[in-house]
Amino acid sequence: TKRWNIQRGTTINKQFISEAAALLKAGETVAFPTETVYGLGADATNKSAVAKIFEAKGRPQDNPLIAHVANVEQLQQLVDNLPEYVDDLIAAFSPGPLTYVLESNGACAENVTAGLSTIGVRIPDHPVALELLQACNFPVAAPSANLSGKPSPTTADHVDEDLNGKISGIVDGGPTGVGVESTVISCREHDVVILRPGGITKEQIEQIVPVAEPVNETVDKPASPGMKYKHYSPDVPLWLVDGDAEKIQNVIAEETEKGRKVALLARDAILELVEADLKLSLGSSLEDVANKLYDNLRKVKRTDVDIIISEVFPESGIGQAIMNRLKKAKTDYIP
Ligand code: TXA
Ligand code: MG
């Protein structure tokens, strides 16, 4: 696996970008940074290239991929019957962490959409991603660049840890910013349904278009195929403890008594008040929590802790995405 280092804040090395684009054009897989998490890219119009993504990640075949493009014109080339309000969403949030699920016009290979009639499209807000997509001039299919089921990668080292030897290259653009994935919305005629909460909040979307509640969803057949799989799991049991510092301390004390080593995953205000074998800091704001979450879930693997205890976060703003991921990752919820 080849690796190119593009430091954030310096001018982007055009040579690296064109090498990475050439590999993608040749039907290979290349990981690259976005503002949310690292993506594992392949030419979305090339079926055998896209198949390599599923292979490298161990991804279930029925879970569709997001097509990444550099601009609105490229987005329009992949879809039919674009609802009018989507222009307003694009003006407000793209480039950015919002994925539009729209009627596909069949321009992408059929395995990108896993046979669905719709396609998810996103314009990422990251200078390296945008340079790469411009250099490609074809849509780039890209799921998060982790092994299926693991926390998404927020650094090139995370990608390397999961996929070294299984993919052709990694463009290292430093740590990502948002830290959780994009919001995925199903764009219906007059309103949208949030299929996966993410970097753009429900409150932000509601400023532009009504957000409807999902209907007819079952666990086996959710509106977004990816949501039915086990996700984001650290390698250690994760308990969510819904309560204040005292409650958390009590739960930790009980486990310590049984001889277990406990890691506490929480914001600094709680870390300061509670004793634990390992303290994993999520900073102070909910934005900090989103940014630091996956790195901390991965870190635990390199320690000898037996259990991770996390605080429960308010489900407002980016907190919706954080709690969506933690509820999927958890092995227990202590009310
Ligand atoms: O921030 C992100 O979205 C990152 C970066 C790399 O862009 N990508 C990402 O991709 O998280 P992935 O594959 O890990 O998650 C995509 C989600 C899955 O839950 C998938 O089922 C859903 O989007 N999805 C994609 N296309 C869809 C479609 N046509 N209909 C419904 N859901 C779709
Ligand atoms: Mg993913």
Image (cartoon, rainbow, N blue to C red):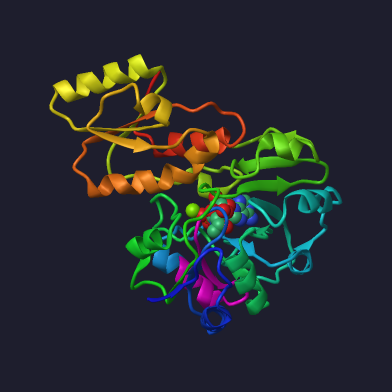
User: In the drawing, does residue 98 fall left or right of residue 179?
Assistant: right
Q: Which residues are magenta?
A: 37-53
Q: Nearer the viewer, residue 275 or 211?
A: 275
Asked if residue 324 can be seen in this view, the reply is: no
The image quarter containing residue 158 is bottom left
From what the image shows, is residue 5 above or below residue 246?
below
Q: Position of residue 193 (x, y in %)?
A: 69, 40
Seen at 41% across and 73% down, the residue is: 167
Seen at 52% across and 76% down, the residue is: 49
Asked if residue 217 can be seen in this view, the reply is: yes
Based on the picture, tell me whether residue 44 belongs to the magenta stretch.
yes
Q: Position of residue 159 (x, y in %)?
A: 40, 62
Seen at 55% across and 64% down, the residue is: 142
Q: Position of residue 41 (x, y in %)?
A: 53, 69
For the N terminus, the quadrant is: bottom left
Seen at 21% across and 38% down, the residue is: 305
Based on the picture, tell me whether residue 314 belongs to the magenta stretch.
no
